[in-house]
Image: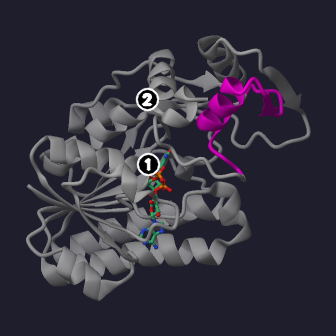
Amino acid sequence: MNFLITGAAGFLGASLANSLVRDGHQVRGLDDLSTGDPQAIDKSVHFTRGDVSDRPKLWTLLQNVDCVYHLAARVSVPESILYPREYNTVNVGGTVSLMEAMRDVGVRRVVFISSGAIYGKQVRQPLKETVRPFPDSPYAVSKLSSETYVRTIGELWGIETVSLRVFNAYGPGQNLPPSHPPVIPNFIKQSVRNGSIIIHSSGEQTRDYVYVDDVVRAMVAAATAPSIDGEVINVGSGTETNVRDLARLIVEITGSSAEIIYNPRASSGIDRMCADLSLAGEKLGYSPRSMLEEGLQLTIRQDTRFSNA
Ligand code: NAD
């Protein structure tokens, strides 16, 4: 098959692109390299640097494409609170531009990578796709409105659409920015350096951490799965882990003497997050394969930033 991946030089985009070319597909990648790293992509991916809102570029890239994976986005919740307009422009505007270009060219299917963040604070766990979302950041709003645009424009113009609500993905090559880094690579970095791991609040807050290979398998399945038009589907591990246990596990695996420090005044965000995976099982034949401990070991071993530390 012929694929276009937006955000192809990012953490999830590069893993997906590399997996698809290994399976013999033709893959084009688009990324503006605002955070992505082109070195992470296999040489046989046809890579173009550019903005996801550049419709003339999209018209060219979309020729003869069977399925588009849309991952290009700004991805930081705290940054989105500071710059909501930017998040609306890139995440929502980029999605609408892409859908318009897909309509113009006549592409059959798009797989949009949404986020578990759209659920916000919910008492009942695990989270089913049918619960009413309560996004609590501009990032989450941008993902929820993109889901709605994707489904609506798709329905109007006969493009098959599916949105995957990915929970907290982790694995080798995850972007590690200096401010507000994602929790797993940040804890690993501190741990391998025997530094300090700082936990916001009590560490009782839970998240659903899903290994990158599992996310890639769900994304691959979404390109060809039948009867998924218009669906939104959770992709997670289905397991709830609190941040305190996560930190302890990382310290144990790395054999580190890192100190775990609690900052009770820092906000811990949403209390609980865990994906219900029934629909993913039914529609994509998905079930997660990597347990957290194994996924962390693979991350530490395969990511040279940690294995060479
Ligand atoms: P990432 O930052 O590594 O990847 C995003 C990529 O998009 C980067 O390579 C960046 O350069 C590119 N990009 C940003 N703005 C662009 C623009 N205007 N035009 C073209 N490219 C642009 O993040 P990731 O973790 O790989 O996330 C990929 C997608 O998955 C995002 O849409 C994100 O919202 C979603 N997602 C990620 C997670 C996770 O835990 N990693 C969870 C839920 C959803």
Q: Residue 166 versus residue 184: which sits nearer the camera? A: 184
Say left or right for 238 vs 107.
right
Inspect this view and state whether residue 29 appears: yes
Quickly name the residue at label 2: 302
- Residue furthest to the bottom: 56
Residue 170 place in picture, x, y as percent: 49, 36
Task: Specify the amino acid type for callout 2.
Answer: Gln
Residue 164 visible: no
Q: Nearer the viewer, residue 18 or 236?
A: 18
First in sequence: mark 1 vs mark 2: 1
Measured in 3D between alpha carbons, the distance from the residue under mark 1 to the one under mark 2, in whole angstroms, is 14 Å
- Residue at 38% over, 58% down: 38
Task: Measuring from the top left, give residue 116's x and y in whole percent.
Answer: 50, 45
- Secondary structure beneath disc 2? helix
Between disc 1 and disc 2, the foreground one is 2
Residues shaded magenta:
180-204
Task: Residue 11: give its label.
Answer: 1
Residue 169 on image: x %, y %: 48, 39
Query: In what quadrant of the picture does the C terminus appear?
Result: top right
Q: Quadrant of the N terminus?
A: bottom left
